[in-house]
Image (cartoon, rainbow, N blue to C red):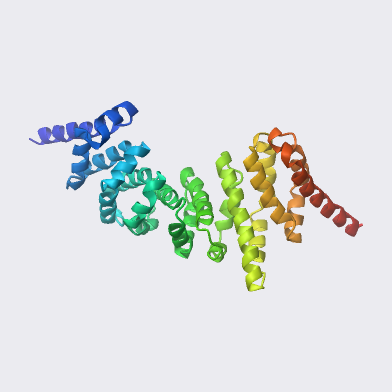
Amino acid sequence: MEVENEDHKTVFQCACDIIVITLTEDECMNLLYNNGNGKMYKNVVSWLNTSDEKLLSTAVLALGNFARKDLHCIEMVSSGISKKLIELIKKYNTSTRDEDVKIQHALLSTLKNLVIPPQNKLQVLEEGLIDAIYPMIKMNQYLVVFKLLGTFRMVIDGQEGAALNLISRQDFLERLVFWCYNSDHLGIRGEVPRLISWLIKNCRSFKPLKVVLDVDGCVKCIVEMICSNHAVMQNEAFIALSLMCTGCKKNDTELQGGVQWDQLVRQLVAADIGKSVSFVLMKYGHKMDKSSIENLLTLLEQLLFEHSELLNHLKEADLSSRLTSLTSNSNAEQLKERIDKIVNALKARQDSIKSYTT
C-alpha cells in the first residue's frame, strides 16, 4: 500500500510538472487560455482554492505562465485573479518553512507578471499588494527575495504614491542595502540598485532624499551600478544620481543650510564615483547610445560646476581624457560642445592646482 501511495505521489508530481512545462510554449499557452475560456485555464484557477500545497503551487506557476502576455494579464486582473493571489500570499508572507518557499516564489513570480501592464498597476496596488508582500522583506531565502525585489520594482513604475510610500521607509531601504552587500545572489545585487533608482525616479519628490542619504550604502550601490555590463542599468544610475543632485541642491536652497548637498558629495566621493564613470567611459564609451551619453553629461555637469571637492575627485579619475575619446562615438557628435565644456573645466582645475603647487 505504501508503494502504491508513493507511486501515486510520483505520478501526481509528474503531471503537475508537465502542466507547467507545457504552458511555457507560447502556442500551447494561447490555446489552453482560449481568451479565458479554456478548460485547462479554468481548472487551474479553481485549484487556487485547494488545500493541497503541491496542487496550489502548480496552479500559481501555471497562472504565471498564462500571464506572459499583456492581454492575458489585463483580463486576469480584471477577473479577480490578482486579488486571489494577494489573499494567498498573506497566508505565506511570514512563513519560514522550506515547503512554503516554492509557493512564495510562485506567487511573487505570477504577481510580478500581472503588474507589468501599466493598466494593472493601480488596481493591484489598491487590492493591497504592498501591504501583503512587505512582511517578506525580513526573509533570507534569496530565490524568494529576488522575486520580491522584482515585484516591488514592477509595481512602482509610474506609480508615484507607491514609490513615495516605499522610499520614505528607512527600514525598507536598510534592508535593500543589507541584501545588496550580504548576498552572493548576483540577481539580488543587481536588483537592489535598480529598485532604489526606480524609487527615486518614480516618487516625483525630493523630500525622501534625506532618508536615502541617511541609510548608509544607498548612494554607493547606485554609483556601483554605473559599472554594470547592461546599458539600461548604467542609464538608470545616471538618472537617479542626477535627480539626487538636483533634489539635494533644491532642498538646500529651501533650507539655506547646504547640509544635504554636502552629505551627498561626501557619499559620492566615498563611493569613488570618478572611478566608476572613468571605467564606463573606457569600456563602453565607444558604443554608448545618445540617450546614455546625454544623461551622463547631465550628471557630470551637476557634479563639476557645483563643488570643488567633486571637481578635484573627478579630475583625479582622468575623466578629461576619457571624455575626449568619447567624441569618436558617432552618437556624441551633436554633444561635442557639452563634452568640451566639461573637459575644459577639468583641465582648468588641473592647471590651477599645478600652478598652486609650484
Q: Quadrant of residue 4?
A: top left
Q: Quadrant of residue 19?
A: top left
Horizontally, residue 58 falls left or right of residue 150, namely left
Residue 150 point in image, percent of width and height: 43, 47
Q: Is residue 144 visible?
A: no
What is the total number of numbered labels drawn onto the structure image? Answer: 0
Query: 96 and 24: which one is in front?
Result: 24
* The C terminus, quarter of image: bottom right
Residue 69 point in image, percent of width and height: 36, 36
Residue 182 point in image, percent of width and height: 48, 52
Q: Is residue 108 visible?
A: yes
Query: 145 and 47: which one is in front?
Result: 47
Residue found at the very far bottom of the displayed protein: 256
Q: Which residue is depicted at the point 82% across and 54% down?
A: 349
Residue found at the very far top of the displayed protein: 27
Horizontally, residue 233 falls left or right of residue 322, namely left
Task: Give above or below for 251 relative to 75.
Answer: below
Query: 282 and 34: which one is in front?
Result: 34
* The N terminus, quarter of image: top left
Task: Give above or below for 357 relative to 285.
Answer: below
Q: Which residue is depicted at the point 74% across and 42% down?
A: 323
Residue found at the very far right of the displayed protein: 358
Residue 8 point in image, percent of width and height: 14, 33
Task: Give above or below for 240 relative to 113.
Answer: below
